[in-house]
Image: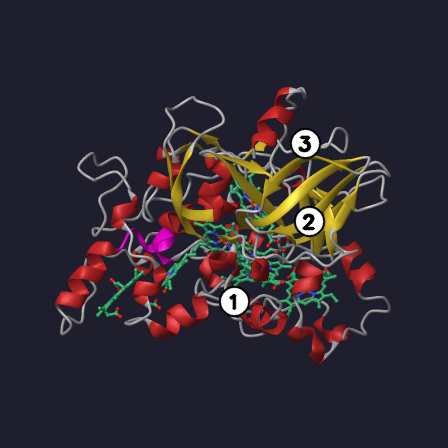
Amino acid sequence: MNQIAKYRRCITTVSLIGFCILLFAQCVNRENDKKANDKVASSTDSTRDPVDLAQFAGSASCAGCHKNIYDSHIHTAHYLTTRPALEKYIKGSFEKGKNRYAYDSGRVVVMEKRDSGLYQVGYYQGTEKVAGRFDIVVGSGSKGQTYITRFHQQLYQLPVSYFTAAGSWANSPLYPTYPVLFNRPITSRCLECHSTFVKVVSAPGIEPEEFDSQMIYGIDCERCHGPAARHVAFQSRNPKETTGKYIINPASFSRKQRLDLCALCHGGRMQKTKPSFGFVAGDKLADYFMVDTVRPDPEQVDVHGNQYGLLRSSKCFMMSPDMTCNTCHNPHENERGNIALFSSRCITCHNKEHNSFCKISGRAGPSLVKNCIDCHMPLQPSKSITELLPGDTKPTAALIRSHLIAIYPDETIHQKPGLPKIH
Ligand code: HEC
Ligand code: HEC
Ligand code: HEC
Ligand code: HEC
Ligand code: HEC
Ligand code: HEC
Ligand code: HEC
C-alpha cells in the first residue's frame, strides 16, 4: 500500500469527475407538503440525535419478524449496491488470460489473488509499480461495477472497473488512460448514494475525507425506514404488540416526502449543504441540498441517476396528482426486466375506460399491452456512464431507461421495424 502513496507523489493530481456525474440540478418544490409524518422529528428539529452507527440494527435483525420483505429485499439492486470485496461478488474474472486490462503493450493492470486479498497490480514493462487491494465492490452489476481500495482511512477508486454490457474489465469511467492512476478519492457523496451509513471521521473541509472502517453496506431497510435499533429492541421486548413503534413507514408520507426520499439518490447532481447521511426518510431534501425549483430541460438531463428530473417533466407525472416512484416500483422487490408487469402498471391509468389508451393500439394488436416500455421509455445512452473497453479509442455508453415518458417516433421505428409487428 505504501506504493500508492509513493506513486501519488510523482504524478500530477488530475481532478476527476464521478462515475455518476449527475449533471444538472433539479427538484421541484411545487407539490404542497401535505402533512409531516408525526412519527419522525423533522431535520429542522434540533431535538433529534445526530444519526450514528449505534442507532442501526442491520437488516438481518428484521428477518425474524418481516421475513417475506427481508427475503425479497436481499435480491434487490439496492441491497447489493455495495458489498465487501469477496471474489464471489466481483463480476470480472481472475482467471489467467482474462484477468488483465492493457492500456498499451507496456502498461498493464492485472487482477491478482494474493495471500492478503485480491489486488489490481499496475505493471510497467513487466515490472510491478503499484498495487491496490479490492476492499469494497460498488454496483449490483446490472450496468457495471467499480472497486474501492482503503488506504489508511481514505478510500480510492481502483483504475479498472467491470462493464457488464461488454462482459469485460474496462478503464474506470473518466480515469485517464495515461498515466495509469490509482489516486481518485472516493468522497462521502458516492457512499451517501451507494450505502446506508459510514461515519466520516475527518474534520469538515479536509480532503480526501477519512472514514471509519465500519460501514453498513447497500441501501438497506434503515435507509428508507430510519435507524431502527429502538424499534427492534421495543418489538422484541413486547412480542404481543401489534403496532410498530419507533419506525418510519413511508406509506403515511405526503407525495413530496415520498419523492424526496427517492430523489435523495435519484435526483441528479445537487449542491450539498449538509452531510446527507443525516437525512432520515420523511425529511425535506431542501434541508440538505440546494434544490432547483425549476423543472429541468429534459434535453440537458442525463438518463443516469436522475429518474426524478426526467419523470417530473413527463405528462404522466404532471397530470397525475398522486404519481410517485412507488406507482411503478415496489421498493422491496427486484422486478428488473419484468416489462409485462411494468406495462400492467401503465394500464391502471391508460385503458379504454379512461379513454387514454395508446393511439396505435388498433394497428399494433393485442401484444401491445405486454410492452409499453420500449416505445415510451426507451433505453438511451448515458453521457456520464461510459467506459473505455480494451483496444477501443472511443468510450462505450451504458444504456439506461429514460424516465421521460413520452412519444418517441424514432424509437418506435428503430425498435420495431415494420410496425405493427411487435413481439
Ligand atoms: C421482534 C419483531 C420485530 C423486529 C425484529 C422488527 N420489527 Fe418491524 N414491526 C414489528 C411489528 C410487530 C410491527 C407492526 C405490525 C406490522 O406492521 O407488521 C412492525 C412494523 C414495522 C413497520 C411498519 C410500521 C408502520 O407504522 O406501519 C416497518 C417499516 C418496520 N416494522 C420495519 C422494520 C425494520 C426495518 C426492521 C429491522 C431493522 C424491523 N422492522 C424489525 C416487529 C418487528
Ligand atoms: C440512499 C440512496 C438511494 C435511495 C434513498 C433510493 N435509491 Fe434507488 N438506487 C440507488 C442506487 C445506488 C441504485 C443502483 C444500484 C445498483 O445497481 O448498484 C438504485 C437503483 C434503483 C432501481 C433500479 C433497480 C434495478 O433492479 O436495477 C430502482 C427501480 C430504484 N432504485 C428505485 C428507488 C425508489 C423507488 C426509491 C424511493 C423509495 C429509491 N430507489 C431510493 C440508490 C438509492
Ligand atoms: C446522487 C446519487 C449518486 C451518487 C453521488 C453516485 N451514484 Fe452511482 N449510481 C446512482 C444510481 C441511482 C445508480 C443506478 C441507476 C442509474 O444508473 O440511473 C448508480 C449506478 C452506479 C454504478 C453502476 C451500478 C450497476 O449495478 O450497474 C456504479 C458502479 C456506480 N454508480 C458507482 C458510483 C461511484 C464510484 C460514485 C462516486 C464517484 C457514485 N456512483 C456516485 C446514484 C449515485
Ligand atoms: C428503497 C427504500 C426501501 C427499502 C430499502 C426498504 N423499504 Fe420498506 N418500505 C418502503 C416504502 C416506500 C414503503 C411504503 C410502501 C407503500 O406506500 O405502501 C415501505 C413499507 C414497508 C413496511 C410496511 C408494510 C408494507 O409492506 O407496506 C414494512 C414492514 C417494511 N417496509 C419493512 C422493510 C424491511 C424489513 C426492509 C429491509 C429488509 C425494507 N422495508 C426496505 C421503502 C423501503
Ligand atoms: C397514475 C396514472 C398514470 C400512470 C401509471 C401512467 N400514466 Fe401515462 N399519462 C397519465 C396522464 C394523466 C397523462 C396525460 C393525459 C393523457 O395523455 O392521457 C399521461 C400521458 C402519457 C403519454 C402521452 C405523453 C405525451 O407527451 O403526449 C404517454 C405516451 C404515456 N402517458 C405513457 C405511459 C406509459 C408507457 C406508462 C407506464 C410506464 C404510463 N404512461 C403510466 C397518467 C399515467
Ligand atoms: C410510470 C412508471 C414508472 C415510474 C413512475 C417510475 N419508474 Fe422507474 N422504471 C420504470 C420502468 C418501466 C423501468 C424499466 C425496468 C426494467 O427495464 O427492468 C424503470 C427503471 C428504473 C431504474 C433502472 C434504470 C436502468 O436503466 O437501470 C431506476 C433507477 C428507476 N426506475 C428509478 C425510478 C425512480 C427513482 C422513480 C421516481 C422518481 C421512478 N423510477 C418512477 C417505470 C417507472
Ligand atoms: C410499437 C410502439 C408502441 C407501443 C408498444 C405502445 N405505444 Fe403508445 N404510442 C406509440 C406511438 C407512436 C404513439 C403516438 C401515436 C399518434 O400520435 O398517432 C403512442 C401514443 C400513446 C399515448 C398518447 C395517446 C394520446 O391520446 O395522445 C399513450 C397514453 C400511450 N401511447 C400509451 C401506451 C401504453 C399504456 C402502452 C402499453 C399498453 C403503449 N402505449 C404501447 C407507440 C407505442
User: Does residue 26 appear left or right of residue 34 in this picture?
Assistant: right
Q: Which mark is residue 259?
A: none
The percent position of residue 159, horizontal first and vertical second, equals 67, 39
Q: In the rendered structure, which amino acid carries the disc numbered 2? A: Met
Dominant SS in magenta: helix
Q: Residues within 10 Å of mark 3 (few under 14, many from 20)?
A: many
Whole-number angstrom distance, CA of label 2 to CA of label 3: 15 Å
Viewer-proximal residue, 370 or 231?
231
The mark lying in front, picked from 2 and 3, is 2
Q: Secondary structure at mark 1?
A: loop
Quadrant in which the N terminus is drawn? top right
The percent position of residue 104, horizontal first and vertical second, equals 85, 38
User: Does residue 203 appear left or right of residue 235 in this picture?
Assistant: right
Q: Which mark is residue 334?
A: 1
- Residue range in magenta is 221-228
Residue drawn at x 77%, y 43% is: 388
Residue drawn at x 60%, y 31% is: 4
Mark 2 vs mark 3: which is more N-terminal?
2
The percent position of residue 422, horizontal first and vertical second, equals 77, 73
Q: Which mark is residue 181?
A: 3
Whole-number angstrom distance, CA of label 3 to CA of label 1: 36 Å
| Residue 36 colored in magenta in the image | no
Residue drawn at x 15%, y 72% is: 239
Q: In the rendered structure, which amino acid carries the disc numbered 3? A: Leu
Q: Ligand 2: does it lie within 8 Å of the C-beta at label 1?
A: yes
Viewer-proximal residue, 81 or 133?
133
Q: In the rendered structure, which amino acid carries the disc numbered 1? A: Asn
The mark lying in front, picked from 2 and 1, is 2
The percent position of residue 24, horizontal first and vertical second, equals 58, 34
Q: Compared to 341, does 100 lie above or below?
A: above
Viewer-proximal residue, 199 or 361?
199
